[in-house]
Amino acid sequence: MSSFAWLTICLQALIYVSLAPLLTGWIRKAKARLQNRRGPSVFQPYRDLRKLLAKDVHVAHTASPLFRVAPYIVFVSTWLAAITVPILVVELPTAAVADLIVLVGLLALGRFFLALAGMDVGTAFGGMGASREMLISALAEPAMLMAVFTLAMQAHSTNLSTIVTHQIELGLSLKPSLMFALAALSLVAIAETGRIPVDNPATHLELTMVHEAMLLEYTGRHLALMEWAAQVKLMLYGALIVAIFFPWGMTEIVDVDGVMIALLATLGKLALLGAVLAGAETVLAKARLFRVPALLNFALLLGLLGLLSHVILEIGT
Amino acid sequence: MNVASELSLLQQTVLIAAALVLFLSFVLLAQPRLLAAIRAFAWQGGLLALITGLVATVNAEAHLFVSALLTLALKAILIPWMLHRLTRRLELERHLEAVKHAAFVQIVAVALVLFSYWLVLPIIQQDLGFTRNIVAVSLAVVLLGLWVMITRQQAVFQVLGFMSIENGLFLAAVSATEGMPLVVELGIAFDVLVAMVLFGVFFLRIHNSIDSLDVDRLNRLHERLEDSR
């Protein structure tokens, strides 16, 4: 692997942290327009982050050192997970180091520390948010792994680069297993990033919040890192769906032209996906928390059906 | 290895539709709302007609077009419409039936799909053309229809299960052979229609006598006082 490839990885890592707030801002803007509001500018998340980074940090008296460390762990683990998802170049050295299962593991690590930090201060809301987050993730992870296995069986590898290469070589083909895997992965992404049927990212209404409840005690740069990590995670899931199911435009040859085209293609696809998400959030209402297990159960079923339909319908004996 | 990449786009559409038929059987199993379940059944019939039509196009079989049209008219439009009218007449539009032990029911359903795949494996060895993989799906749809009839308490859901068994048999006929002879198919279609009419009469009778369509309440010979709500 040439040094140029490592350069693209650094570039990709920078793209994730620098463009994730833009994606969030774009989704908020699109949602506001759909609801007949003008909405804040798409650059508002950057301003929020800058404001939070400049502010002083206040930590509760009851907090342990873990409370201070957690934001860094959450941010770095999410970022590391993001680097293994190709957005520009198919052949990533990092994808060879960490496959899809490691990706799920890295996200789980971040979530674990997020939940610990939520419980650390000892407020009622933090504990409630942590327990809800664990409920959701315990149900979402099997569904995610089912979708991952469906893809891995097609490409005969859990390496994300191999899977994407396989998808590109396949060209345009309708496959029932991919259809089910896409549906399952979308549901998991919605649950994991706390979007509307599961959690409402725009509210601090105490009875319904999940992610926000864990962050209530955070201030200043800690809060900025936590929010930034959530934005990177949203972009990660978007990039994952785009890379696996709509990989057109990504380059296999590493050169400047190819990377530029791939960057434009990926940004366009992510913007489209964000608009779709905004539309879905406008149409749907938030579900009751006790309906969420049913939703994730459905995602697991879709993943299983993807696996089964691959075995039954697509493997000729 | 994968064969799907070597199939034409039409054939891939058939496989997608078959997978959706299987998915709709799962929907019938888990859907608590009556009207939504009827709609899912109608979609299943429509997809079946689509599969039949596409198989007819690929294999150039004229008589399959007739059975595709018959399926569309009967299973996607007429029978759902009749069921819809019945539920409105019995004032069951807002009826909700929570599925008991939903996760268990789902796991057994997945096991049934695996079982039918295992059962059909020797048939797949025979060279049957591109639809051979659908045989397993059709058997699974039959078994899932039976499972719907076992797990659901409400009579209309059980009828939906029964009708989806018929859908599965029809799918098997289309995918394993080049469809049944037209005479047989017409006979079956007529039978299904008559069955639907009879079911309608039964619904009304059951509803009149026990004031509910929950067939579990037919198990008792005497209505005890606390049961007569």
Image: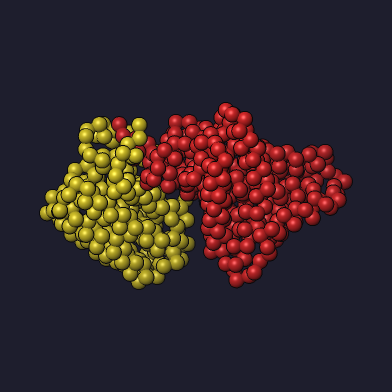
- Determine whether, in the image, residue A114 is placed left or right of residue A159: right
- Determine whether, in the image, residue A119 is placed left or right of residue A186: right
* Residue B99 in the image, given as x and y percentages of width and height: 46, 53
Q: Residue at x 54, y 53 (%)?
A: A268
Q: Residue at x 68, y 38 (%)?
A: A77
Is A84 in front, or is B138? A84
In this picture, is B37 found above or below A266? below
Number of marks in picture: 0
Q: Please say whether residue A250 is visible from this viewpoint.
A: yes
Q: Residue furthest right?
A: A61
Is A49 in front, or is A69? A49
Is B189 in front, or is B72? B72
* Residue A31 in the image, given as x and y percentages of width and height: 60, 63
* Residue A242 in the image, given as x and y percentages of width and height: 52, 47
**How is this picture coloured?**
by chain
* Residue A257 in the image, given as x and y percentages of width and height: 54, 43
Q: Which chain is yellow?
A: B
| Chain A colour in the picture | red
Q: Residue at x 75, y 43 (%)?
A: A71
Q: Residue at x 59, y 42 (%)?
A: A138
- Determine whether, in the image, residue B188 is placed left or right of residue B150: left
In this picture, is A242 found above or below B32? above
Q: Please say whether residue B148 is visible from this viewpoint.
A: no
Which quadrant does the N terminus of chain B fall into?
Answer: top left
- Determine whether, in the image, residue B99 is placed left or right of residue B142: right
